[in-house]
Image: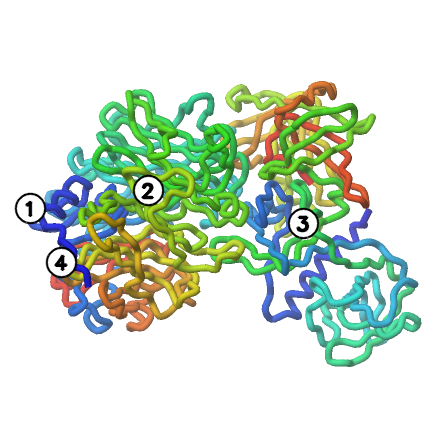
Amino acid sequence: MTKHPRISMSVLLVIFTLCGAMRSESQKVDNLTFHGDNARLGWNASEKVLTPNTVSKDTFGKLWHAPLDGDVPVSPLLVTNLKIGGAEHDVVYAATDHNSVFALDSISGKVLWERKHLFEPLTQAQFTGGWFGPVHGILSTPVIDRKNGTLYVCTIRARGLRQHFDVWALDLTTGATKAGWPITLKGRYKDTPFVPGQVMQRGALIISNGWVYVPFGGRGDIPPWRGWLIGVNTEQPNVPQRLFCSSPESDGAGLWSGGGVSADDRGDFFASTGNGEYDFQRGGSNMSESVLRMSVTNNKLDFSRQKKDYYTPSNFKRLDDQDEYLGGATMNILPDQSDSSTPHLLFTGGKDGVAYLLNRDDMGGLGGEVQKIRLCGMPNAIYYEGIRSTSAYFDAGSAGRLLYVAGDQPGGNGEHGIIALHLRAENKDAPIQMTQAWTMKRDLNGPSSPIVTSNGSEDGLVWVVETNDGDHSSLLAFDALSGAEIYDSNKASAADQFNGGKRFTSPIACNGLVFIPANGVLCYGMKSNKAVKESAQ
Amino acid sequence: MRSHLSLISVCFLTTATVHVNAQASQEVYGTIVSMRGNILAVRPSLRPKMTRVVFDNKTEILTYEQMALSALRPGMRVAMGGRYSKSSGFQLFWLEAAQKPIGHLRTKTIGLQQDGGWAMAQGNLKSIQPFVFADDAGTEFTAKTDRLREVMHDMLADRNRLLIGVRIRAQGMIAPDGVLTATTIAPERNFTKEGTMFGEILGRSGDIIKVRPRYTQETISISLKQKTSFIRQITLDPDTVKQGDSVTFWGDQRNHSWDNPKSDDLKAIALLRGDLRYPGADGPTASVYLNGKLSSLEPVELTLNNGKKINVIIPAQMPVVRLETISRTELKSGKQAMLILSRNAYGAFTASTVILDASPWVGYGG
């Protein structure tokens, strides 16, 4: 077995600090953005309570359920050691499809503050497209800037003959709207105006270099729709917004993944696009079924059109024709793989079940991937629901570096549900290649994005919510190295079971607790958790 | 053109299918607004949100035509409905027949499905005079055909029937994310004598234009007739529409005799300024044009000329437009067009209307 150098804990700490999953003084971990950081790795390497040895159906289970005013179609966020009302709390933030935002105490699940109906949500008939409940409000994971004590969230509203998206800045401790907000998203990219009625805002928000960015995709492929990424300055919200459109002259190329876009330390953004027109090779600007790097230069957000800054699978036409788009899985920006010729990698998956490894230094243009392998689905399938979740990463030290991919359907080589991939290079002059480490024994039928908890490189657990597990949803946990099932809420007591898990979201796991978006928020943890017990008394 | 009765019979049949088949499939009834590969986006008439319909080579595309009772032959698969009583027997009002079990005629059925004084049944035709059929348990039934109003002949069609703007009834299973994988798709012929195609005009030579249909690399030739209408859609800024303006909304209402609950609320497809209209469809569930004064913008309310107030639901994609007549010389290369087409038995297209710069959302409207 090839030996791999471990990423040191100091490097991990730097990654977490830079990317937003910050450690507070008491060594608790915050979760300020979707999948924990701007690289969207979904890995909390500071978990000491939840381990393969401590979690079981006897020791672990549901601690509380906080029903809110609607469904929570977004990932919760967590801020620790925050003073609210004179007392210190670890605070869970959740947004609902009723355009509401709630702050909950992580121990008791009690509401600390609430902002209901920031704007009146839309009805289904107003919204059109989309596959959600009877009302349509916030559909995307907010983002938190802990330094300025602000949560940013995007709402939708109808006003007269138009619809609008607005970004709000809410005070973390009170929920009050900060001065100068909300800001209505508007503007144009070159000659193309942003038309809110054409698009859906499902992708998580992201903060980079003092701007909050909001991605958009289509509403059920009803033409015309376009992919947009729009930035708002957090310090001066009224300065002109930064807009980029991935299909300025035609339909499609939505940036719709629930995980939103990813950003590297320089502030470059990476996103995969969905169905639609692809005419780039003919000189056009419509980039469906592609992975793009978007950069800010001279205060403008744009795509360079250079081969090193995009990737398009060579079978893009077929992907589009069969609705087997890229775009459902947010890009993972992998930590440096310095023992290979491809140290700077991106990873994503497509709805056709194919996983892609790309080189950030030269993304390869048309057909220029580092590696692509089919994990689930059949090559000639039509409308196959393969990979539409954002994958998670884990550096297990000497046990290797792994990616965890959730797929909806079985693969041709016995793959089911979660597939773990080893990342290895034959030598330092060879590229990283993916090989299967393990796979689940059964299929998933609507998995959330998986996440990983570990204590450094030890005690790795992979968590995922199966949103459509028969009559229930279920929380599942697996040993990150062996794939052994550690926990399944459907096999636990009736009190530990739940319904209404949400696709295109992710649970979060920090400080011994797991928070799940559903019809409200659920909290799972060790049944012996003293603080929770005391709060219930 | 099919009568109102046959529409109701389709509704009955759908209900019957649900009753008879334990594995009830679900249905979407609406207008195709986009088509990419094997995926249709359908604007439903009876559901509030858009639905995607996926089909493959196992999906049956169904069509039908009227046939004479005398054209029936023993061995055909039949479905029927009408009045029933023990004393006067089974009096047929409608009948559907196919050479072999297709679509909902595949459903295994035993006995008469009775509801009040009505009954429906399905089986294999034994004889026409007297009318005898056997259900799927082999039990034979007789029925009277003297009050039979129509006989429909169900047939398989090809996927070329699925044009944007065609109203369809698709049946299949709906996945958790709302996508219907169709086992059958039946284009509604009465509303869609013609279908809509979107594409880019590549050139015109006399009465023939060449068009590249949206999302394809093909080129097709379309004939223009002397009476073909040429229209340009001018999309207006919604902010130019003010309270008190006289406007026309095109949309759907659920106030037919069979709607439950009924509502006069209008689900808008488009807001029009000026006098020109999109070519309308006909039939009992065709969309309506309502003209009046915009008495409120929040919420949107239209006051009709008779004083009645209508609550208008504004979907996200609703365009605000004015239509103007143009000449055929404006059909220039590079222009985006919506073409309302019919095709003859050999597959050749003829346009009855060409609308430049039309919103795909409007489709044919149905």
The secondary structure type at the circle numbered 1 is loop
The type of residue carrying mark 2 is: Ala
Q: From the image, which quarter does the N terminus of chain A lie in? A: bottom left
The type of residue carrying mark 1 is: Glu
The one nearer the camera, A148 or A83, is A148
Q: Which residue is mark 3?
A: B168
Residue name at image x 31 percent, y 52 percent: A391
* Residue A224: % across, % down: 53, 34
Query: Is residue B203 shown left or right of residue A443?
Result: right
Q: Chain of mark 1?
A: A
Q: Chain of mark 2?
A: A
Sequence order check: which comes first, mark 2 or mark 1?
1
Q: Which residue is mark 4?
A: A455
Q: What is the CA distance from the residue labelled 3 to the residue labelled 1?
A: 62 Å
The one nearer the camera, B255 or A225, is A225
Picture disc at residue A25: 1
Q: Which residue is mark 2?
A: A204
Is mark 4 in CB contact (under 8 Å) with mark 3? no
Residue name at image x 51 percent, y 45 percent: A320
Q: Are marks 2 and 3 on the same chain?
A: no
Residue name at image x 57 percent, y 35 percent: B312
The one nearer the camera, A147 or A14, is A14
Residue density around tag 2, few if under 14, some if 14–19, many if 20 or more, within 10 Å: many
Q: Are marks 4 and 3 on the same chain?
A: no
Q: Chain of mark 4?
A: A
Q: Are marks 1 and 4 on the same chain?
A: yes
The type of residue carrying mark 3 is: Ile
The secondary structure type at the circle numbered 3 is strand
Sequence order check: which comes first, mark 2 or mark 4?
2
Q: What is the CA distance from the residue labelled 2 to the residue labelled 4?
A: 27 Å
- State the image quarter where residue A509 is shown: bottom left
Residue B163 seen anywhere in this rendered image of the structure: yes
